[in-house]
Structures are given as structure tokens and as C-alpha cells.
Image (cartoon, rainbow, N blue to C red):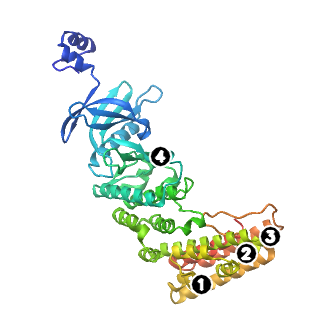
Amino acid sequence: MAKGLTITSWSEWLTGLARAPSAAAAGAFSDELRFPTAEGLIVVREELPLQHARGTARRARCTTSGAEYDLRRLRVGAEEGGLVALEALEAVDREADLAGRAGSHPNVVCCHGVLVQNAGATHSRLLLCDPCTMDLASYMAELGSDLPVGEVADLGQQLAFGLGHLHSLGILCGGITPPGVLRGLRDGFWKLADFSRAAVLPVAASEWRDRCRARPQEAPPEARSHTDDAVKPEADVWLLAALLSALLCGAGSVGVPAVPPRRLTDPGVSRLWLLLHWLLAEGPECRPCAGESAALLGAVLHTPPLELLDEMPARQRRRCRGVALAAARQLAVDLAVEASSGGNRAWRLAELSLERLREELRDSSQVDLLLENCGFDPSSILEADDAGDHEAEGSEAEHCAAVRAVAAAEKKAVCQDVGVHSDISTNASSSSTSDEPPGLSSACSAGADSVTAFKSSCSELPEEAAASAVNSESADLLGLFT
């Protein structure tokens, strides 16, 4: 708007503009944008559009220094020609405000200033941000393959540093997705850039859910139920681990680090896989904070698996051991089937214990390597498999052992009647044949009854012992027919 013009109506504004000096008239229609910032007034001019930030960003250049910036536009319009929804307008204002509060950090996109632009029924907030080159989604598309495990761990460490900075300011990031992670132009660091689901801590879980409208599988476990419990900063740790799990294991893995057993023969993959189980713990109190997560991710490729397991809470350690043994058993079955010429042999192999499976293999080096990478000594598999029992004492241990014996007897009876047994994999996938064995439907019913009876017997156990027993035995029973 031209300086020195007093506006009472559009007609007076146009009349006054026509009589104003040429410089003032030119400034009224200039594409320059003036941002008041902590460093002073920054005047920029918009340039080419950018692909990242979901297409809402343009490159801008300072007219004085020539420095480059990203100009992000947060826009909300009226619905069906009516008025702008108050909820949508508040969401835009909140995102712009939190982006400005985030301040300066190498792993968070810095917002230097905000301008308000309202045109008709469209309300916009312009954010002057540090320049970035691409988002993580574009980087993955250009790469054309999975990220190496070292890059996944490095990315996770950088984003964990950014989360730690936000948490120190009382901000919950609330959403970490590939389009919302940008790579800086000047330093090349990965940065958190999406504040559309961010909130000021403390925030109730129900309030945060209503704001972000995330699908249940995209939200941390503590934010899925209809409760008003306060969301803790560790929710961001779960969201970060869910992103890393998808990068390590594939896009279909949401919150579950499910990798093919053969990949666990890679020491780097197995160690990061173990750590992700910890970061994806059900309870926020079982997860490390953002700062600790950054330290763990930075050292995970060089940390012995036993040391990593010892750092975990007991419940997560038992879970990791159980899933690792299931992965080793799956790999042993796969290798034995590949070495066998008979297709029906797979059903018999699936009934064998891991120790027997290793004896069946001519070369068990891959299975042994998987076990070593997950913190087991291949020469003492049985002792490691029973480690969870030794953590319980007194009547808890006796009751747990009795329940295990009942479940094992039921499982053996079902296998003898039907003669089939499907293996368990880390992906909870099932092995199948072209011909369905006779009596499979009745066996499935019997197996389901066995699982129900087993879980009923566990209901009298204390929570920790029951969880351990269900994880180890109930999963085996379900694996008979999955």
C-alpha cells in the first residue's frame, strides 16, 4: 500500500493512488514482501515454486542481501462460498504460531517471520523460513531403493535432536512424516518442518486427537483410546520410531518393525531393529526421552546387542528376545525347506524346536549369526529361551511353568490330530501350500479353543508374568493356523 494515503473507501484509494508520486504507486503493486523479524525488517521477492512442503512453498530472495529463503503459504478458504470455519482458521493460526515459537535449531526449520494475507474468503499466513532443497519423500523417490541402515540411524538421530529442542520449549511435534522432513540448503541437515499436528504441552489426548484427526495406526498407543490423559513428549519418540520402522522395513510397516528374518543376519539391521522395539513400547514410561533416543541412535550400529538389551526395561527385553527367537526359528525352517526336495516335509519341520531345526541343517551358520546379532549365544539356546521364566520367582514361576506345560500339551495334541503346523515370522505371516490339509477347519476351531483356555489360565497371573506367558505360548498356538 502506498505510504501517505489515507483510505476510507476503494474509490478514494484509487483516486489518491493516481495523484501519488510514481515511486509510491509502484510500491503499492510491488511483489515485495516485508517481514518484521528479530533480525530487523527483511524484504523479499517471490521467485520459483518449490516441490517440497506439499507444493505450498516458493523460493524467495532478500532484496538487500540476496539471501535465499523458503516462503511457505498456509491457506484456508471458505467452504462452498460461505464463511471460513473457525476451527480451520484457528488451526492455521496455531501452526504459524508454533512454527515461530520453535526458534533456531539445526534440526528444526527456522521460521523468521509471519505475514497475514487475507483476500476475499481466503485467509493465508506467509512463513519466511530457512531454505531447504527437498523433503524426505522426494529423496526416497530419487534414491529408488531402501535407505541404508546407517542413513536411517543418522536420520533418526538428527530428528531426535530436533524433538529434544521442541520438548525443551514445551512443544509436542505431533507428526513426523516423509513430506514433513526437509533437508536444509545451507547445512544439509534433516529438519522437522511440519507443525500441522503440533501442540503446546501439556495437551489432553482427546484434544490432540480432535485437532489432528490422525488415523488410529498413525497415533501413539496412549493417544488411541478415548481418554483425557495428558500426552507426554515420549509420544513423539513413538512417532519417530514409526517413521524409522517404515524406512527400515518398508512402507507397509506402521509401528511394527517387521523385517524378513534373513535381514537380521546383517548386524546393523538387527541392532536398529532391537532398538526400534524399545522406542515403540506400548507405554510412554517405557520409552527413552528424545535426548536419550538421539544418543542411542547415534551409537546403535556400534553397540553390542547384549548391552542394548540390558539397557531396555525388562518387558521390552523379553519381547525382543521372544521375537528374535521366532525369527531364528522361521529362518531355520526356510533354510531346511529350501534344502529339502519334498514339499510335505515343511509341515514336519514346522513342529520341531529351534535346537532340532539347527541339527537338521547341514549349515546353521546363518541361524547362528542371526542369534548372535540379537544377543543370543547359539550354544545355549534353551537357556536363553527360558530366560523369561527365571525373572519370575516363587509361586509366579511355578504357575507360569504349569501354564506353559498345559499349553504345550494342547499344542502337541492339535498337531498330532491334524499333522500341520505353520511357522511364526516376525511379520506374523504364514506359510501355505497349494493343497489344504484335511480337517483344517476343525483344527482351527480346536486351536482357537486352546488359545482361549490358555489366556484364561493366565488371567490369574500378575501382569508381568501373564504378559510373558501369553507372548511366548499364545503366539505359538495362533501360529499353528495363521
* Residue 203 in sight from this viewpoint: yes
Q: Amino acid at mark 2?
A: Leu
Residues at circles 4 and 1 in contact by the CB criterion of under 8 Å? no
In the image, residue 229 sits, relative to residue 197, either above or below, namely below
User: Residue 137: percent from the left, percent from the top?
Assistant: 47, 46
Label 3 vs 1, first from the N-terminus: 3
- The residue that label 2 is drawn on is 349
Q: Residue at x 63, y 67 (%)?
A: 425
Give the secondary structure at mark 4: helix
- Quarter of the image where the C terminus is located: bottom right
Q: Amino acid at mark 1?
A: Leu
- The residue that label 3 is drawn on is 342
Label 2 vs 1, first from the N-terminus: 2
Give the secondary structure at mark 1: helix
Q: Residues within 10 Å of mark 4 (few under 14, many from 20)?
A: some
Q: Which mark is residue 222?
A: none
- The residue that label 4 is drawn on is 137
Q: Nearer the viewer, residue 67 or 291?
A: 67
- The residue that label 1 is drawn on is 382
Disc nearest the viewer among 3 and 2? 3
Give the secondary structure at mark 3: loop
Q: CA gap, disc 3 to disc 2?
A: 11 Å
Disc nearest the viewer among 3 and 1? 3
* Residue 226 in sight from this viewpoint: no
* Relative horizontal placement of residue 15, taking residue 188 as reference (left or right): left
Q: CA gap, disc 4 to disc 1?
A: 44 Å
Q: CA gap, disc 2 to disc 1?
A: 18 Å
